[in-house]
Image (cartoon, coloured by chain):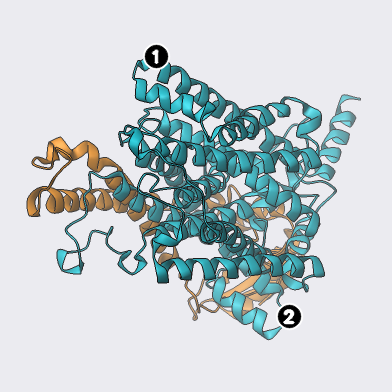
Chain colours: A orange, B cyan
Amino acid sequence: MSAKNKKFVYGIFDDDQVVLNAIPALKSKGLKVKDVISPFPIHGLDEVLGLERTRISIACFLFGMTGCGLALLMTSYMNIFDWPMDIGGKPSFAFYKNLPAFIPVTFESTVLCAAHGMVITFLLRSKLLPGVEPHVIHPRMSDDQFVMAVQINDDSEIANVESQLRAAGAIETKK
Amino acid sequence: MHKESELRPPLILGDKTWHDITEDVCRPVESKANKWWWLAFSVSLAAFIWWVIAVSYTVGTGLGVWGLNKTVGWAWDITNFVWWVGIGHAGTLISAILLLFRQKWRLSINRSAEAMTIFAVICAASFIVSHMGRPWVAYWPLPLPNQFGSLWVNFNSPLVWDVFAISTYFSVSLAFWYTGLIPDFAVIRDRANTKWRKRIYTILSFGWIGSAKNWQRFEEVSLVLAGLSTPLVLSVHSVVSMDFATSIVPGWHTTIFPPYFVAGAIFSGFAMVQTLLIIVRKVLTLEDYITIYHIDMMNRVILITGSIVGVAYITEFFIAWYSGVEYEQYAFINRATGPYWWAYWSMMTCNVITPQLFWSKKLRESVFATFIISIFVNVGMWFERFVIIVTSLHRDYLPSSWTMYSPTWVEAGIFIGSIGLFFTCFLIFVRVFPVIAMSELKTIVKSSTEGAKKKQAATAKQETH
């Protein structure tokens, strides 16, 4: 989407269902429909656009495992190996005996790392950071309009793509 | 497309379009505040200033300015802490648990309920820091090397679990809330017609445009965060209850505490959501989005959790008698008939009797009755924590140490002030942030608005003829 040397023609639509139905039809006519920008998630769009399933939940699981492992290392090192204490007749002499008492901290650390790891991955992977200038194609694309991006190789295709988009239900087209 | 039976009440009244939602939700952000907002804001800010004075006085002089004594070492501070954390729980319940259960009615209220969570946890944390007496060593409960002060923290201690639970809960709730806000900030950014508004919301919206891949990841992140937040929110109040339950104080040493505290937290949290939203829907004219149906649904949650809390109170009493431990038995008899009987019976009236009124559909659907009962529940839940903490401590094993507790103006100042802090934050929130999750709400426009329902019913009628 953001690659500068690629050229796009944008079709503006006003209904999600029209967009969803138009994509397979346009694709079968040879148009390269690359993306749809919408004000809310459209279910079924991933399949018609041919997007792969996101792996962010796998990343989240790995972050969670990391958090869990770090917490177990931390509790065992600090309370069992480095400086074991006997408080209230409840000594910290063996990791497996103290493990039940370490579960709350381990659980919280797992959730902490999983959640923040996933959110940070999401922001970085989607290039969402404070200061990023958005590529606003249509001022109402976050309100109630849907923008379909069709990739073209050179300017001679514009007229054809525009008429195809209009035929598919676009209310407006943009270069 | 998602289909919904026309028999279900509409979640959005009127024949709203996507653009109407944008207009209605952005209006408070884009217009000037009216005099009612300024009045409420001034009162909250004044209370907050009292909070600043009272906390500064406590930190500067020492905890002796509070009404605590050797027997009652925890009182209003921890009462308020538990009360505020509990209130926060409803926000996570609405945004996470109701998302997992696919309850669409959460969409109109999740944003403000999550905001309430964040502000309530900030208020709760302020009591933790101020009750330490020496807040400049507040980093001691963190697992830092010994050169920083004390020994390693004791991971067997519920107070350390609490540090981890509350900080995880706060930061994860904040991340969840902000992730949901990004697309809505982008809406305000794209509509902005002044330079500064454009600039601020460009920064806040992180460059969001809503491409297909963005939305795909966004939905996955929301779902997984909901899955993580659900056990997290249950763990937080369980851990808070273990601050008491793992001790040997009669009245605290109870295995029922974790589920009892979680139910109480959701109960009080929903009451606070009702109190806030009944005002918000009126002041911001959002009655079409936060409908009587939403209020009814929340009242049902109050009814069920209130009943759980009531059963827990009675179970505690039964177990105290059944245990045969006279200290435990005395603790409970003292609660109901001792010098703090009035606190106990306020709690019983507000938490056990008032929510039972919601068996009546008429009362569940009455805005006025809901508002009054929600206030009762808030008061009752505050008394519950007071009863658990103060009446258990003031008379335990050693009768020679028995004493009474009463707060000073400083504690009262911090408590009233924390309510001021909460409302100051919330009032700023309603003017700066979109109070309804627009982009999520737009997904149900075609199936759940009043207009869509009528159209559906009309086509169904045509088909049968």
x and y percentages locating residue B163 in the rendered image: 34, 53
SS at circle 2: loop
The residue shown at (60%, 48%) is A43
Circle 2 residue: B193
Quarter location, residue B354? top right
Looking at the picture, tell me which residue is in the foreground, B410 or B113. B410
x and y percentages locating residue B3 in the rendered image: 70, 37
The residue shown at (19%, 39%) is A99
The residue shown at (49%, 59%) is B122
> Is residue B347 placed above or below B360 in the rendered structure?
below
x and y percentages locating residue B29 in the rendered image: 71, 69
> Is residue B141 placed above or below B39 in the rendered structure?
above
SS at circle 1: helix
Q: Please tell me if label 1 and label 2 are on a single chain.
A: yes
> Is residue B290 placed above or below B234 in the rendered structure?
below
Of circles 1 and 2, the one toward us is 1
Tag on residue B307?
Answer: none
Circle 1 residue: B322
